[in-house]
Image (cartoon, rainbow, N blue to C red):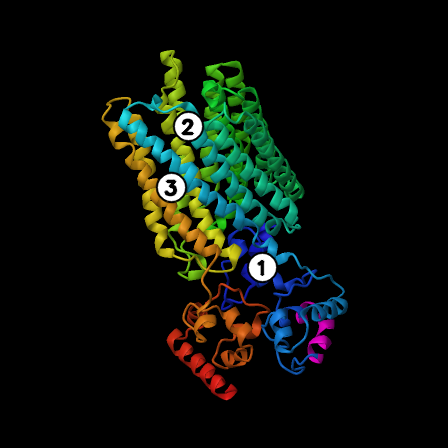
Amino acid sequence: MQNEERQKVADWPKRTIQAPTPDRAGAVPHDAAAHAPQRFLRKDMTVRQVACDFPATRQVFVRYGEPPDRKPFGHLEPLDRFAARHNVPLDRLLAELSQAAGVPVDRHGPAAERVHRAFLATALALSLTLGAGWGAWLLWQIGLAGDFHSVPARYVVAHGDVQLWGFVGLFIAGVALRWLPVATATRPAHRLVAATIWACMVAGIAGGFVWELWPASFPALGITSGAALLIATGLLSGFLIRRVAARLPQPWACAVLAAGLWWVVWAGFTLWLRWTHNTPGPDSYTLHQRDGNIELAVFALAGNAVYGFGLRLLPGIVGGSVNQQRAMLAVTSHNVGLLLLLFGHITAQPAVEIVATMCLAGGAISFALAVPGFRRLKQFAERPEQGPQGLSRYIQLAISWLVAGVLLLVAGQAFAIAAEQPVAHAWRGAARHALTVGFLTTLIMGVAQRLLPIFGHTLLAWPRLVMPALLLVGSGNLLRVATELATLVTPAAYWVMPISSLLEVAALALFAANCLRTMWPRRDPLLTTGRVAPGSSVAVLLAEHPWLEDELIACGIDYLARTRSVPRELTMASMSRSHGQDPESLLRRINELLRQADRTSK
């Protein structure tokens, strides 16, 4: 499938404008997909696309005013705008086109393209408040007291569960629901299913946080919140399994399948913990229970999800191709290590645990060697649609912290066995932070800022925030890991450690602002001023003024004569530069034509 997709890109005319295409994120390129007829009609499809895919529909368009002898036939105008311009009820137009083409009308497509928004916006809100925000406050209490045990265990568990379930879990769910149907050419999740998953996850996270802080006052919340999480993961697991079953035994599909199954196991374990510790709460969790909860989140769910989605997504972000043998070795070694680690916790055998962490480390190293871009980045042409080059640095940094985190676990357990004592709390905390913030959070930040523009067919809102956020999260995580380890040597490290939380929360705030503005962008300049600007969308211009298409082609923009639909993220500046033209000159020409049209209409 990947080879076919890459061949479609290679077959494109060299001067064709490429969107930040799904092949750069694991799916079929926007315009290349038009070479195979769609099996449905949508109101956002262009007249030309429908006419090319279903020639029998041309008579319908001609009847409503489309010039029959124009070459190429049909404007790059969405069906809903065509209907409005010709005073035709949209439902009637779609019905007639559907009858002529012999395919149904897809009325749920636009909603499916927005399914990720609620999940990601909620994840950001929870992280900045009850997750990383609450964790930063706890870290300051620890720093002032100079003791990791100065705050109750239930406070730490509450912070961890919100960050893992609320930030990592919701992000994975949102991306999976939005991206996986596109990558596998399958139907999106039903809106009711997606809404149920979101509602159950939010109820499970919020209810669990309240119960963890005040278990004696709200004992029922422990069980009901755990049950809500189990329902959500059951639905998610079924969604993942159905989407990737036909792609087995590809390594990425195996990892996604494992993530879905482990997700249910983690939810079941969470429910069991909240059931059996209903009244005393997390303060009564044993060390192995707390470790098991975190490891199921970090390794079972997030690790497999990152391996699975990463093997499909990262080549599009950093360039290159995946080494399939190393990828399968990474997925296999990772899951074998995870099983051994859980077995070691249950049987309390440190020797099994160190073998398990060595398997996890082997999987991490194999993954780093399997994915492209870890050692050397491919240079892409500088275009706004491709996103800032700095996003690739997130990937390199995250994978580096993955390897460092698991190696810290191996070293800590080896020393503990040799010294015949438990792993020091500070050492465990440093390894976990390397994995949760250094690996997972950094990777989420990098991938999300690349995927969200693709999901929304737009550009990243504030590309200048990419590098500051990277520097903040990287320095904050390095300071946190270093000072946690330094507390084993000097108590003075406690005073420095809380500063890391300020850096990390600041990084998350910049990241959240960029994500939210990208998911809900400003209106196009053309719609607010009536004039085009360098950042104006070509698709919006042609939807508002389809007559300008011929003028642009006459100006030398021959891409518009070849394509069937224009990516909404393609800007006037990018299109003009790709044709060797000066953007300012072209914009002056188009704006003069718009002014003439305004005078004529008056």
* 1 or 2: mark nearer the eye: 2
Above/below status of 62 relative to 180: below
Q: Position of residue 172 (x, y in %)?
A: 53, 42
**Mark 3 or 2, nearer chain start:** 2
Residue found 53% across the figure and 48% down from its top:
118
Residue picked out by circle 2: 155
**Residue interval drawn in magenta:** 51-63
| 41 left or right of 120 in image | right
Q: Is residue 438 visible?
A: no
Instruction: Check disc 2 and give the amino acid type.
Output: Tyr
Nearer the camera: disc 3 or disc 2: 2
The residue that mark 1 highlights is 8
Q: CA distance from mark 3 to mark 2?
A: 29 Å
Say which amino acid is labelled 1: Lys
For numbered disc 2, what is the local secondary structure?
helix
Residue that carries the numbered disc 3 in the rendered image: 397
